[in-house]
Image (tube, helix red, strand yellow):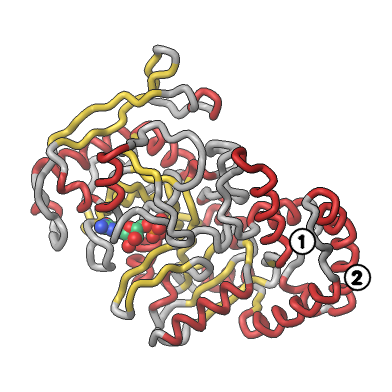
Amino acid sequence: MVKAVVGANWGDEGKGKITDTLAAEADIIIRFQGGANAGHTIKNKYGKFALHALPSGVFYDHTTSVIGNGVALNIETLCGEIKSLVDQGVPAPKILVSDRCQIVMPYHVLFDQYEEERLGGKSFGSTKSGIAPFYSDKYAKIGFQVSELFDDELLKEKVYRVLETKNILMEHLYHKPAIDPEETLATLRKYRDMIAPYVCDVSLFLDKAIKEGKTILLEGQLGTLKDPDHGIYPMVTSSSTLAAYGAIGAGVPPYEIKQIITVCKAYSSAVGAGAFVSEIFGDEAVELRNRGGDGGEYGATTGRPRRVGWFDCVASKYGCRLQGTTDVAFTVLDVLGYLDEIPVCTGYDINGEVTTEFPVTHLLEKAKPVIKKLPGWKCDIRGIRNYDELPKECRDYIDFVEEQIGYPITMVSNGPAREDIIYRDSKIK
Ligand code: GDP
């Protein structure tokens, strides 16, 4: 049985925590897209970890953690993360890396930095991890697959060939020193030795696992609104964030994905530039940002303050629809306990017309939020384990959001730890 855990919005919805919780009942957890540019924050008995490359189930000793072919693999980040876990007392994880996975090259990181510098004020707010140059090269068919590291002759010919064009950009567009092919080759040989213990034919491994009835979790990075096709293009990421892409980025048949758990946070947050209709500012924003998540809404990779806002029913309904949601996990609800009234964005006013359907980017830029205020519950709901014990106002908030988005909220997360999860029967099927 294959399940996907994906985000409905801009990312940082708490997918890491939900994956970690569900991993208790899973055999294999696989990352299928993205790179080490975003992070999941996990809190457990070993400590608090910001994972960038490894899947979230890596702390259990019964699970196998897999890096699928769709991922932008940064070998140094991955191996550094494995080492830091072991150093902090986590049992040595079982890790597999697809032989078809492509490698983030040192020059991808440089090009990402230089291009953001060149764009100045018009930059994309990239984390400068090389992700956009990586995926550009992948689709331009000049990327390097893990399997290629093991053929030195091929590697040499390709490095020289690819750097010929890269160095023209390096010197004449960015006015930076040319990259030395021999240095790149030396790095790749080092990468080969670092990654060798983990390399595997992942789609074959997963095919066997499916036939044996194993439970496989596909762990998404970011959320629907960062998808290059269905998100807020061009302020998106460079790989598909949708559950459907899990089939490709992991190498499983699409019809094997039986459950799609879309994670929605009880308020909104976003990093980087791009339209964010329900965004709030000033003291109101500072308070939500500092109370948000677990220790404030600051990026797990960059430490950047996240933009925050109220729950956006329009964006979340759309986000859930594109994911093909079977279940919604509604997270970080405990954070809203300080509010007398909870504002929710129920519609977008675009040129005087109100819509509840998420528009294309140029119309989105014009949208003003239509806000409804619901009564707050004014207490701490952490530690509650039964749905019926949640305050009435809190259950009303969940019911309201569920009705607006139209997908069943079957899990409610009321704290950062694995145990902080409440299962719920939804009226929506
Ligand atoms: P992801 O990228 O979707 O995995 O999200 P992040 O890990 O970046 O952000 C979620 C943050 O919220 C992390 O700091 C989590 O520890 C924290 N978190 C997750 N679920 C809850 C919750 O229900 N309540 C609280 N207070 N924090 C949570």
Hey, what amino acid is under mark 2?
Answer: Glu
| Helix, strand or loop at mark 1 | loop
Which residue sits at x=81%, y=58%? 142
The reply, left or right, for residue 427 in relation to residue 259 is left
Q: Which residue corresponds to mark 2?
A: 157
How far across and how far down the image is residue 323, in percent? Answer: 47, 45
| Helix, strand or loop at mark 2 | helix
Residue 15 seen: no
Which residue sits at x=43%, y=61%? 300
Crowd class of label 2 (few under 14; some 14 to 19; many from 20; radius 10 Å): few
Crowd class of label 1 (few under 14; some 14 to 19; many from 20; radius 10 Å): many
Q: Is residue 299 above or below residue 418?
A: above
Queried on whether the Cβ of the residue with tag 2 lies below 8 angstroms from ligand 1, the answer reads: no
How far across and how far down the image is residue 204, in percent? Answer: 64, 71
Q: Is residue 394 above or below residue 44?
A: above
In the picture as drawn, the residue positioned furthest to the top comes out as 352
Task: Give the quadrant of the N terminus.
Answer: bottom left
- Residue 44 quadrant: bottom left
Which residue sits at x=31%, y=28%? 346
The reply, left or right, for residue 215 in relation to residue 145 is left
How far across and how far down the image is residue 406, in percent? Answer: 33, 35
Would you say the residues marked 2 and 1 are in contact, meaning their CB atoms lie under 8 Å apart? no
Q: Is residue 373 above or below residue 418?
A: above
Q: Which residue corresponds to mark 1?
A: 143
Q: Is residue 344 above or below residue 5?
A: above
Hey, what amino acid is under mark 1?
Answer: Gly
Residue 420 seen: yes
- Residue 251 quadrant: bottom right
Front residue of 111 and 5: 111
- Nearest to N terminus: mark 2 or mark 1: 1
Front residue of 76 and 346: 76
